[in-house]
Image: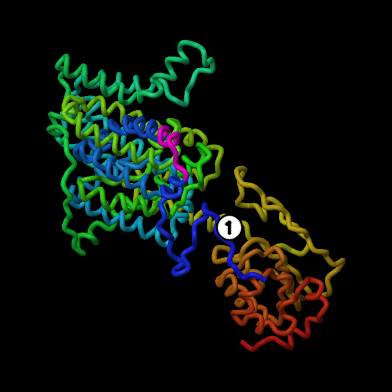
Amino acid sequence: MSTQTPPIPADEPVADTRNPRLHRFRPRLLDSLKGYDRSQFGADLGAGLTVGVVALPLAMAFAIASGVKPEAGIFTAIIAGFLISALGGSQVQIGGPAGAFIVIVYGIVERYGLANLLISTMLAGMLLMLLGLFKLGAMVRYIPVSIVIGFTNGIAVLIALSQVKDLFGLQIDKLPADFFTQLRVLGGALHTLNPVALLVGGLCLALVVVWPKSYRMDVDPHSARARFSRIAAHVPGTLVALVLATTLTALLNLPLETIGQRFGGIPRTLPSLAFPEVSWATAKLLLMPTLTIALLGAIESLLCARVADNMGEFKRHDPNQELMAQGVANLVAPLFGGIPATGTIARTVTNVRAGARTPVAGMVHALALLLVVLVAAPLALHVPLAALAGILLFVAWNMGEWREFARLKQFNMPYRTVLVGTFVLTVVFDLTVAVEVGLILACGFFIWRMGQLFSVQRLGEHPQAGAMVAAVDDDDASPSPTPVPPVPQALPDGVEVRELYGALFFGAVGKIEGLAEQLPASTRLLVLEMHRLIWMDTSGLDALEQLHRQLHRQGIALRLAAAHAQPLSLLRRSGFADQLGVHGIAATLAEALAEPPSADAAAQHKP
């Protein structure tokens, strides 16, 4: 017989036998280039150029809203966007500066300064690389959807609030990062409102909203409107609004603040490489900003990759490779003055709908932006900030999942509490506090719900809705019934049987602790039937041991019957099975009832 190992298919990754705990660094680009032909390149080229046009105004808007110069957003889109596509684990994801980072970056710049933002971004990049290297990409999916929706909507509100200043043309030197202080400062400056800025920003917002989208085509493909929509959908509405507003501002000399007036324009070359000075003291100071950037970057990139997977016949993304690529991008981009980057859903959706096939499209998008910087950077001098504010209001609206607030009444109280609590904390405090408190609330509610699902029933009393599913609301599915074992016609005198349901863990031990006091005075033997006890932890084991000691003092024997593998293994490994004696653990309820109680009483250990 031949012992030759069968060949591994080309599309399956080879395991790293030297250290299987580490994820192998293999970008999806390497697999995509196998059999790459001219037709695929043509599709990727067209998609990349389209996304590059879409990304240009967004990159500048995100940077300005974050409190940094517009070129920082463009450089981030070029450098980080290229690296995320070239090294990532998704075929079509586009990376770059994201709207979700606006509030985070603005707060860090206000509190720690621009230099420390760059350092924090690099440290977050290292953390993202480690998360991917140690195969922790799937851990991000353990964050409840209520938390994700809560902080996403909260960030959208803060983005919209941050654009009020430029949309209304208010005369404010610098907008503070604190929510309530922002409201006070904006309210105090309303008398400086610029009607022209409000008109231009409002028109830009309206144009972006009504501009034809590639995913909103007319049902009649032969109508004139449908033909116009197909043509217009290939030109982003954000770019059209930006070009028109810039042209009007320059030709009519409108009294609007522009990029040139506030920032002095955009350089036509990439910045030189510069290494910031990092010390241990600085790293400790930036711990929370680093964790915030890493957490948000991981969540956004993996959510975006999942959206891209569902939009076409693409191979499922590799979450660990994606995190490592995000880490490299956030480590390198700050060396050139870049800000945090992650996967961006709007640009990724545009990329897919424009016909992208491989990561080459994302690389083309970055090169297209570089070409724009080298050729057309001086044109940005006349871009009005009110127009960018109108575009960002549209981004903030699309970013939030506002329908979830209307649907809250359909869900249970824990879900509503976590979602609304995370939303409020994100707006009032910051993302880190919101996620931390949200996770604590989610864990607390989960423990409570699982504790409610555990119950102790008399033999033959199948748990009804008030027992087994006491904590289950309309949005939850009731557990499938487990086959009930045969119930004896009559129990021997002095014998009590209780059936355990659910999981016996630290959140449910209270239902065991008072069991001894509930037994009739004539009880000589208590049998705990465990065939519906699916899991037990050490706290549950300790509760059983305390019950055993209490019953022993009352002269009552204890037996366990029909235990599953996990509880049975814990009982044996802890030595509690030996304490119960020869007949202390029975395979079936009938076997537990067959032996007289006196045999157990003789085998009881001395306390």
Q: Is residue 40 magenta?
A: yes
Identity, as a three-letter code, of the amino acid under mark 1: Met
**Up-down relation of residue 584 to residue 402 (above or below):** below
Residue position marked by numbered label 1 in the rendering = 450
Percent x, y of residue 562: 73, 70
**Up-down relation of residue 577 to residue 284 (above or below):** below
Percent x, y of residue 172: 16, 32
Q: Compare residues 227 and 585 and report the one nearer the observer.
A: 227
Q: Which residues are magenta?
A: 35-43
Q: Is residue 235 left or right of residue 405?
A: left
> SS of the residue at dot 1?
helix
Q: Quadrant of the N terminus?
A: bottom right
Outermost residue on the front side: it is: 2
Q: Compare residues 380 and 463 and report the one nearer the observer.
A: 380
Q: What residue is rendered at 86% in x and 68% in y? A: 490
> So how many labels did they put on this image?
1
